[in-house]
Image: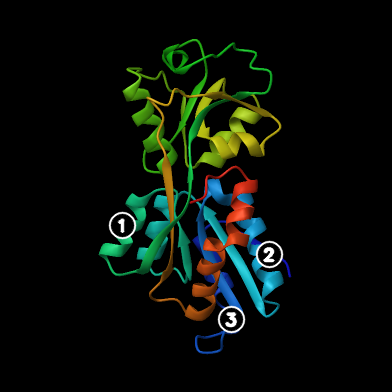
Amino acid sequence: MTVRLIVGVLAVLAAACGPAQGAGEGVEGRIVVSAAASLTDAFAAVAVAFEEAHPGVSVALNIAGSSLLREQIREGAPVDVFASANTANMDQLVASGDVVAPEIFASNLLAIGVPAGNSAGVDGLDDFADEALLIGLCTRDVPCGEFGRLILARAGVVPALDTDEPDVRALLTKIEAGELDAGIVYVTDVASSAGVDGIPIDPKDNIVAEYPIARLTGSANPETGDAFVAFVLSAGGQEILGRFGFVVP
């Protein structure tokens, strides 16, 4: 029971071209779960546990920035479940009737990520204004980019940006490789990487990111989609998310 990590809508479309496992057949068949990049490791573990609990099920994870996933869904990508890193993207799909009754399943905080050892000596948000440092954020279109800019604005810092990355995992990878001196990522992303150290952000400046999940109204396998959502919200699913550093309800 292998969890297939699919990146990008073309791979999702290709996955959908296999034999159909439709609704009305119970908890079985394939489902595609589009999940925010910050959920990469946690949802890989959740998907494995869900498949183990339901031997007739295969879960395909489509991982990307929440806003890109939202647009894929709007354009008709064959997705069964959507898990976003913020409520705004989910709210847009609620308004368009694309999802069923979203629920908050976890929350997260943000932190300053620096390469292990912090050779640049970054110690706070003020350093993001230092033009001598290599500074990165996520693009403003995805939650980590929106939140990062809000945090800096709260702290009164105008960042001297060197790069905007498409999602938090792309930003984390550049920090880990030493290509950047600092960036704003999620606490859970820092915990996932041995090559990245985290510097806490003052609670007065930080943001609590709430993660909603919902089954799509157009799901080809609604029973299994509903079962996956229920599993994420269950004690077992919440325990897995907690292990990866998420704050669970």
> Could you say where residue 235 lies in the image, as x and y percent from the top left?
59, 60
Measure the C-alpha gap from mark 3 to mark 2: 14 Å
| Of callouts 1 and 2, the N-terminal one | 2
Could one spot residue 29 in this view of the protein? yes
Check disc 3 and give the amino acid type.
Val
| Of callouts 3 and 2, the N-terminal one | 3
Q: Which mark is residue 49?
A: 2
Measure the C-alpha gap from mark 1 to mark 3: 27 Å
> Could you say where residue 13 lies in the image, as x and y percent from the top left?
52, 70
Q: Residue tagged by mark 3?
A: 27
Q: Residue tagged by mark 1?
A: 91
Residue 161 or 188: which is nearer the viewer?
A: 188
Could one spot residue 139 in this view of the protein? no
Check disc 2 and give the amino acid type.
Ala
Q: Which mark is residue 182?
A: none
Residue that appears at 67% across and 57% down: 45
> In the rendered image of this protein, does residue 70 appear above or below residue 54?
above
Circle 2 sits in a helix, a strand or a loop, which is it? Answer: helix
Residue that appears at 56% across and 73% down: 31
> In the rendered image of this protein, does residue 27 appear above or below residue 208?
below
Circle 1 sits in a helix, a strand or a loop, which is it? Answer: helix
Q: Are marks 3 and 2 in contact (CB under 8 Å)?
A: no
Circle 3 sits in a helix, a strand or a loop, which is it? Answer: loop
Crowd band around label 3 with a 10 angstrom C-alpha radius: few (<14), some (14–19), many (20+)? some
Residue that lies at the very extreme toward the left in this rendered image: 95
Check disc 1 and give the amino acid type.
Asp
Residue 101 or 190: which is nearer the viewer?
A: 101
